[in-house]
Amino acid sequence: IFKLGKEKNHLKLNLSKKNSADNYYHSSVTKPTSSNNIVNTTTVVEKKVESKPTIKVTQTVKQEDDLSDFVIEKDEKERLIIAGLKNENLKHIIVPKSIKGIKDEAFYNNKNVESLTTHDEFEYIGTRAFAYSRIKRINLGKQTFVGFRSFEYCEQLENIHIPYLTGEYAFGGCRNAKTIKINDGVTSLTNCVCAGCSSLEELYMPDSVTMLSFECFKYCCCFSKSFCFIN
């Protein structure tokens, strides 16, 4: 019980809990009136606010080097490479840090994979690794070698990214690709590297490129938006 003041005209506040099983506090405020000293008492009922229990949400986060979605092999130099998928429903491949390559024809004619992202220590994509697949987007690390016909006839591919060296026909027949981006530091383009990419609109080429090999843009008849050399 709290009492405020000692004079009879001062406010008195009485706070008591009804019982241990009750969730309500009862407080009464007593104040004499100025006209006839009749004491009026007002009772206020306040509901006790109980805190809600904390709900814990558990989220599974894959480790940066989780290999569980992939079939892993070693190449002739004992480097770990991806040879296929354990998770056949995987649509977006983000290559783990310990992986250095993708095996020849690992995703040949694959109908599920939509994108590929490699890291800067990743080294190579094998021969026809994604040929005739439905991959749409690629983002390749700066030292990635794109092998012979690696993305040949990937007709859903939206962009062509040449980060380093390529084999012949690496992107041949990607007829719906709109953009070619070549990384700074690339010095040459191999034979027919983008032959048959007939829908190209934009080409971004750094001034480090000094040699264009035989028919590297064969049947790329129109760059409707821009042909851009990057200094």
Image (tube, rainbow, N blue to C red):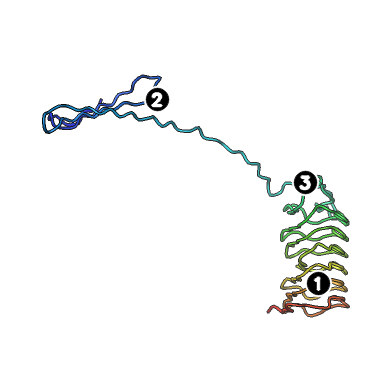
Res 193 seen here: no
For the residues bearing labels 1 and 2, Cβ distance under 8 angstroms: no
Q: Which residue is mark 2?
A: 23
For marks 1 and 2, give the CA distance: 73 Å
Amino acid type at image mark 1? Ser
Q: Quadrant of residue 195?
A: bottom right
Q: Residues within 10 Å of mark 3 (few under 14, many from 20)?
A: some
Q: Is residue 127 left or right of residue 92?
A: right
- How would you rate the neighbour count of disc 2 (Cα within 10 Å): few for under 14, some for 14-19, many for 20 or more? few
Q: CA distance from mark 3 to mark 1?
A: 34 Å
Query: Could you tell me which quadrant the C terminus lies in?
Result: bottom right
Query: Which residue is drawn at the image coordinates 84% and 78% (left, top)?
Result: 221
Q: Closest to the observer: 105 or 5?
A: 5
Amino acid on which the number 2 mark rests in the picture:
Asn
Where 81 falls versus 231 (above or below)?
above
> At x 14% / y 27%, what residue is drawn?
38
Secondary structure beneath label 1? loop
Image quadrant where one finds the N terminus: top left
Q: Amino acid at mark 3?
A: Asp
Q: Name which of mark 3 and mark 1 comes first in the sequence.
A: 3
Q: Which residue is mark 3?
A: 69
Badge 3 element: loop
Label 1, on which residue?
A: 199
Give the label, 3 or 2, closer to the camera.
2
Callouts 3 and 2 close, C-beta under 8 Å: no
